[in-house]
Amino acid sequence: MPPSAIRSVAVFCGSRFGHDPVYADAAAALGKGLAKVGIRLVYGGGGVGLMGIVADAALAAGGEVLGVIPEFLQRREVAHAGVGTLVVTGTMHDRKRRMFDAADAFVTMPGGLGTFDETIEITTWRQLGLHDKPILVCDIAGWAQPYLAAIQAAVDQGFAGPECLRLYEVLPDVDAVLARLAAVTSPGAGQPERV
């Protein structure tokens, strides 16, 4: 694997399943796909919802999985007992920082407020020049359209510049995400913080 290859990806996704089974199918395909190409999954550490599915699929395919969960969510999100490494943090902010440090790139899958929070924060950090790691939004069945519309509205109303639309890429499905991860490089990739 070239030294500039993506070796570790943080996945932001829901602690619920969503109403459409296509979301669970996509989460399973992503976990399996990352494992198949030797990319470590970094995720929120839960064993429920899409989080649990992506981790289970990666583990079943022989992949490396790092879960990062705050102490107060260990019971609420039912921390995944089977991940290779489970890091328990003191706060949500610590969780996001550990996930950021451990990842070469970020993939957003369907999810709720926590997923939006993680995605917007990592995008804001890129806008501020704190990193230049790829951010891929996987728009399963049009799930991301309202989120993307909110960002476009901020641009249209003059609260964000049009250049912010280039901080992330929108891809239609897991196959496209995996293909993009194979094609992109990340500054410092191949040497994520090992926790």
Image (cartoon, rainbow, N blue to C red):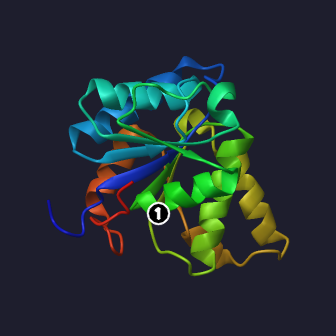
At horizontal 65% and vertical 40% (from top left) the residue drawn is 71
Observer-nearest of 130 and 143: 130
Image quarter hosting the N terminus: bottom left
Please give left or right for residue 33 compared with residue 71 in the image. Answer: left
Task: Tell me: residue 37, above or below residue 32.
Answer: below
At horizontal 22% and vertical 37% (from top left) the residue drawn is 36
Q: Position of residue 62 (x, y in %)?
A: 23, 31
Q: Which residue is mark 1?
A: 101
Report the residue that reaches farthest toward the left.
Answer: 1
**SS class, disc 1:** helix
* Residue 111 sits in quarter: top right
* Residue 18 sits in quarter: top right
* Residue 26 shows in this picture: no
Observer-nearest of 124 and 156: 124
Q: Position of residue 56 (x, y in %)?
A: 40, 25
Please give left or right for residue 75 compared with residue 126 in the image. Answer: right
Three-letter code for the amino acid on which mark 1 is drawn: Asp
* Residue 165 shows in this picture: yes
At horizontal 74% and vertical 42% (from top left) the residue drawn is 113
Observer-nearest of 161 and 69: 69
